[in-house]
Amino acid sequence: MLFIESSKPSAAILGLLPQLDKVAHFFAFGLLGYMLCALSYQLKPKPTIQFFSMPLLVVLLTGILEESYQLIVPGRTASLVDLSADLLGAIFAIAIANRTSFLNRAYRNSAPKKTTF
């Protein structure tokens, strides 16, 4: 979906508010980062995901590819600021994923145990 969106000229609404495209990058790549964290938890359960981990690396590489792709798309430009927003979104997603995992473990550990007869 990211590359499909990058293949078109920027949406008109992004030009109405300054820096709205950076917010869009933050949330789009944050969502990607969160989904990669969820996949990481499923493949190898662990208490936390390190900030410098596979989800962050995949988001970084995807961001670099997307920004490089925008160099050849008419009406689009590549930006290091956009790539920074991508990375910040991923870091935020990893923090949220770790907090969600912590709260989920705390809830499971505090839930009353069912007894069977």
Image: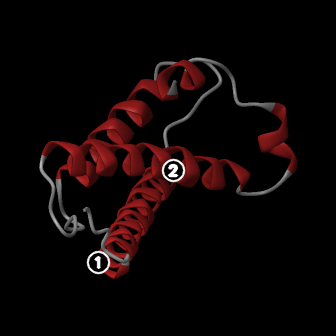
- Report whether 49 appears left or right of 114: left
State which tag comes first along the sequence, 2 or 1.
2
Q: Callout 2, which amino acid?
A: Asp
From mark 2 to mark 1, how far is it between C-alphas?
A: 41 Å
Q: Position of residue 12 (x, y in %)?
A: 83, 33
Residue at 72% x, 53% y is 20
Identify residue for label 2: 82
The residue closer to the viewer here, 71 or 17, is: 17
Quadrant of res 113:
bottom left
Residues at circles 2 and 1 in contact by the CB criterion of under 8 Å: no
Point out the image quarter for the C terminus.
bottom left
Identify residue for label 1: 109
Q: Position of residue 115 (x, y in %)?
A: 28, 69
In the rendered view, tell whether residue 92 sits above or below residue 110. above
- Report whether 74 appears left or right of 33: right
Residue at 47% x, 19% y is 72
The residue closer to the viewer here, 105 or 60, is: 105
Q: Position of residue 44 (x, y in %)?
A: 12, 49
Q: Position of residue 39 (x, y in %)?
A: 27, 42
Tag 2, which secondary structure? helix
In the rendered view, tell whether residue 100 sits above or below residue 111. above
Residue at 15% x, 62% y is 46
Q: Callout 1, which amino acid?
A: Asn
Frontmost of labels 2 and 1 is 1
Neighbor class of circle 1 (other Cα within 10 Å; few <14, some 14-19, many 20+) is few
In the rendered view, tell whether residue 105 sits above or below residue 55. below
